[in-house]
Image (tube, rainbow, N blue to C red):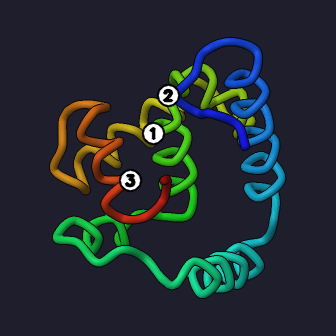
Amino acid sequence: MVDVSATGPASLYHKDLVGQAISIFSKLPYTEKQILLRRFTRMTDGPVSTGRSFAVDSLTCREHEVLTLLAWGYTRREIGASLEISTNTSAKHIANIYRKLDISTSAEAVKAALDAGLID
């Protein structure tokens, strides 16, 4: 298992794997994404029930992807590169996430992702 809190080659390798997985996932048709998300939710015993999880449910699939990468510490530029979108589009998704979750910092975004069970 890779220590995701570490810095250095191991953490860079983990970021690259996560980025590749999300890149592949983002190219799937919408219905296939929904099927995979439902199966993953069942495998992980469902999402964590919190006060903020209802707001996270209002996010689009792409916003979930962006929030997950943001929570892993990716920059707007890295998110854009991983998802093959522009940095401006990445920034717009982040702004939409902040608005929908009523948050204003990346630390709050990480907490929202943790609360919703998007990351460990």
Label 3 and label 2: CA atoms lie apart by: 12 Å
Q: Which residue is drawn at 71% across and 73% down?
A: 33
Label 2 and label 1: CA atoms lie apart by: 5 Å
Residue nearer the viewer, 87 or 56? 56
Q: How many labels does the image show?
A: 3
Whether residues under marks 2 and 1 lie with C-beta atoms below 8 angstroms apart, the answer is yes
Label disc, if present, on residue 113 of the rendered structure: 3
Give left or right: position of 93 versus 17.
left
Give left or right: position of 77 versus 18.
left
User: Where 47 sits versus 99, above or below?
Assistant: below
Which circle's residue, 1 or 3, is located before the other in the chain? 1
The kind of secondary structure element at disc 3 is helix
> Within the image, what quadrant is residue 6 found in?
top right
Q: Which amino acid does label 3 sit on?
A: Ala
- Residue 109 location (% of width, % of height): 31, 42
Whether residues under marks 3 and 2 lie with C-beta atoms below 8 angstroms apart, the answer is no
Residue nearer the viewer, 98 or 44? 44
Whether residues under marks 1 and 3 lie with C-beta atoms below 8 angstroms apart, the answer is yes
Q: Residue at x 71, y 27 (%)?
A: 81
The kind of secondary structure element at disc 2 is loop
Label disc, if present, on residue 71 of the rendered structure: 1
Label disc, if present, on residue 73 of the rendered structure: 2
> Within the image, what quadrant is residue 3 found in?
top right
